[in-house]
Image (tube, rainbow, N blue to C red):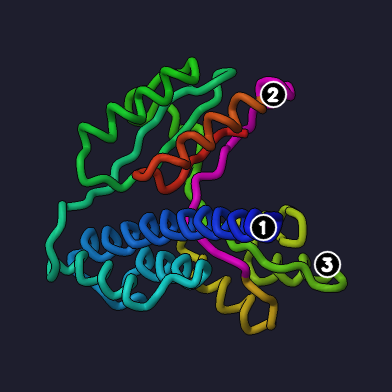
Amino acid sequence: MSGHSHAATIRRDKEATDAKKGAAFSKIGRLITVAVKESGGIADPDKNAKLKLALEKAKEVNMPKDNIERAIERGLGKTGGAALESITYEGYGPAGTAFVVECITDNRNRTGAEIKNLFTQAGGNLAEPGAASHFFERKGLIKVMKEVGVEEQMLKLIDFGAEDIQEAGDCLEVFVSLNLLDELKKKITAAQFKIQSSEMILRPKTKLSLSETELEKVSKFQQRLLNHDDVQKVFINL
């Protein structure tokens, strides 16, 4: 019986992992499709910065080549399916935190209603465009694996053009203006530093300081948003 139970546990774990992986593939597939569509059909990542970043994300999660190709074809209008569009929602969550939620949807009305409901359930509210985004600024973020002699590594990254660097576990979070993102990545790669990921983000200009209780409420709300199929990214002024 114990062996059978162990097998059942392994199967459940595998199903949970597969479901999580499938959800990631779906979100990144939408990101690829919209990146191609909104560029007017540019499927060359060297000429489409958003597509290039989306393909890097696909690589990070080992997304199958067939899935990537289907997403690109959908963006080019070669395959059917509901039309996708990107839309951003802004609002305030627990403890007055400012939220910017980036989505990709095939039904703007449905997504809007569902996101509004999540804000309401958390004791917050949706706001007009610009009401929360002014707390943030667009930046490029490159996560670089720490090397032995991290201080020397940080000095090199600053010489390469990094605006700011923060330590985060086994990584260095390197912030840079968007127009210098690709250039900085090339310099980091040439220096043989390992890049874990890179993306375009909204970085808070100023950050709130919350109590542990408030922070827990904000974190739970953030996770509920991220669990929504249409949500790509969630930014908070923390």
Residue 65 at what x, y percent from top left? 37, 78
Q: Residue at x 30, y 62 (%)?
A: 35
Disc number lying in front (1 or 2):
1
Judged left or right of residue 101, residue 104 is: left
| Amino acid type assigned to the residue bearing label 1 in the image | His
Where is 204 relative to 232, above or below?
A: above
Q: Sequence order check: which comes first, mark 3 or mark 1?
A: 1
State the residue position of label 1.
6
- Name the mark on residue 210: 2
Judged left or right of residue 23, residue 216 is: right
Measure the C-alpha gap from mark 2 to mark 3.
30 Å
Q: Residue at x 40, y 40 (%)?
A: 228
Measure the C-alpha gap from mark 1 to mark 2.
42 Å
Identify the residue at the far front of this view: 1
In which quarter of the view is residue 174 placed?
bottom right
Where is 120 relative to 113, above or below?
A: above
State the extent of the magenta-drawn residues as a range: 196-214
**Residue 73 visible within the image:** yes
Disc number lying in front (2 or 3):
2
Q: Secondary structure at mark 1?
A: helix
State the residue position of label 3.
150
Q: CB atoms at circles 3 and 1 under 8 Å apart?
A: no
Q: Residue at x 35, y 67 (%)?
A: 51
Q: Sequence order check: which comes first, mark 2 or mark 3?
A: 3
Q: Sequence order check: which comes first, mark 1 or mark 2?
A: 1
Q: Residue at x 53, y 34 (%)?
A: 222
Instruction: Residue 144: say if magenta.
Output: no
